[in-house]
Image (cartoon, rainbow, N blue to C red):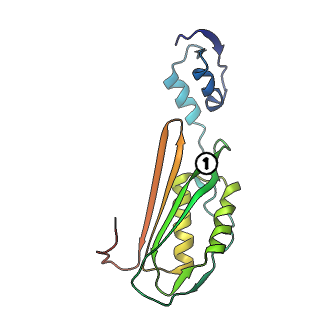
């Protein structure tokens, strides 16, 4: 690659921390390696520990209250949801949407707020986060149906949306997909 200024990137350097240099007009010399090979080297550092991070971490309980009606949906949005990337330790930001049809129990929102805030310091990947939230909320409320969607803000120009769904009944024809 050829830019105006010359910047050396030594072996073992965290690529994510250097990325802003490329937009500052510097030259990157990858010591006889292509950018593709360098990316493969960085990605090879992912471990099983990274993959399982946060899945079974202790979190505050989500409290419930008795539902008085049947056949309706509740949608709750957490627009400023944060967690931590288990690989880089950098913060992840996004919007979490919980849509469910309650059966006997509804989610108590103050406890949901405390539950969501506990993720602020928890290292967990997006995919695991959405499935963990679904698992915990289904366990607490035992709804007819529930869908959790995480829309995470772009990092490196990539926007991620992850959705997980639970259905108590096999026939869910009125539930949006």
Q: Residues within 10 Å of mark 1 (few under 14, many from 20)?
A: some
Residue 40 coordinates in the image, percent (x, y): 52, 30
Work out whether 6 lies above or below 152: above
Residue at horizontal 61 percent and vertical 78 percent from the top = 108
Residue 12 coordinates in the image, percent (x, y): 67, 27
Q: Secondary structure at mark 1?
A: strand
Work out whether 116 lies above or below 87: below
Work out whether 96 lies above or below 69: above
Asked which quadrant contains residue 175, the reply is bottom left
Q: Depth check: give the residue in front, 174 or 143.
A: 174
Q: Residue furthest bottom?
A: 68
Residue 166 coordinates in the image, percent (x, y): 43, 71
- Horizontal side of residue 51 vs 102, given as left or right: right
Residue at horizontal 63 percent and vertical 58 percent from the top = 54
Residue 9 coordinates in the image, percent (x, y): 65, 19
Q: Depth check: give the residue in front, 146 or 29.
A: 146
Report the residue marked by disc 1.
92
- Horizontal side of residue 170 vs 13, given as left or right: left
Asked which quadrant contains residue 117, the reply is bottom right
Residue at horizontal 62 percent and vertical 26 percent from the top = 20
| Quadrant of the image containing the C terminus | bottom left
Asked which quadrant contains residue 100, the reply is bottom left
Q: How many numbered circles does the render carry?
A: 1
Residue at horizontal 48 percent and vertical 44 percent from the top = 159
Work out whether 57 lies above or below 8: below
């Amino acid at each position: 690659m050829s830019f105006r200024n010359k910047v050396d990137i030594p072996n073992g350097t965290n690529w994510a921390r250097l990325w802003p240099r490329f937009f500052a007009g510097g030259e990157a010399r990858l010591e006889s390696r292509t950018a593709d090979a360098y990316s493969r080297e960085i990605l090879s550092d992912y471990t099983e520990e990274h993959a399982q991070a946060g899945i079974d971490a202790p979190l505050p309980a989500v409290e419930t209250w008795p539902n008085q009606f049947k056949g309706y949906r509740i949608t709750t949005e957490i627009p400023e949801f944060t967690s931590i990337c288990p690989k880089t330790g950098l913060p992840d930001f996004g919007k979490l949407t919980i849509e469910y049809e309650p059966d006997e129990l509804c989610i108590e929102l103050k406890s949901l707020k405390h539950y969501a805030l506990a993720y602020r310091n928890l290292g967990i990947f997006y995919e695991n986060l959405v499935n963990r939230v679904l698992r915990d909320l289904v366990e607490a409320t035992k709804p007819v149906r529930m869908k959790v969607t995480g829309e995470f803000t772009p990092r490196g120009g990539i926007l991620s949306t992850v959705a997980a769904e639970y259905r108590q009944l096999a026939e869910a024809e009125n539930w949006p997909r």
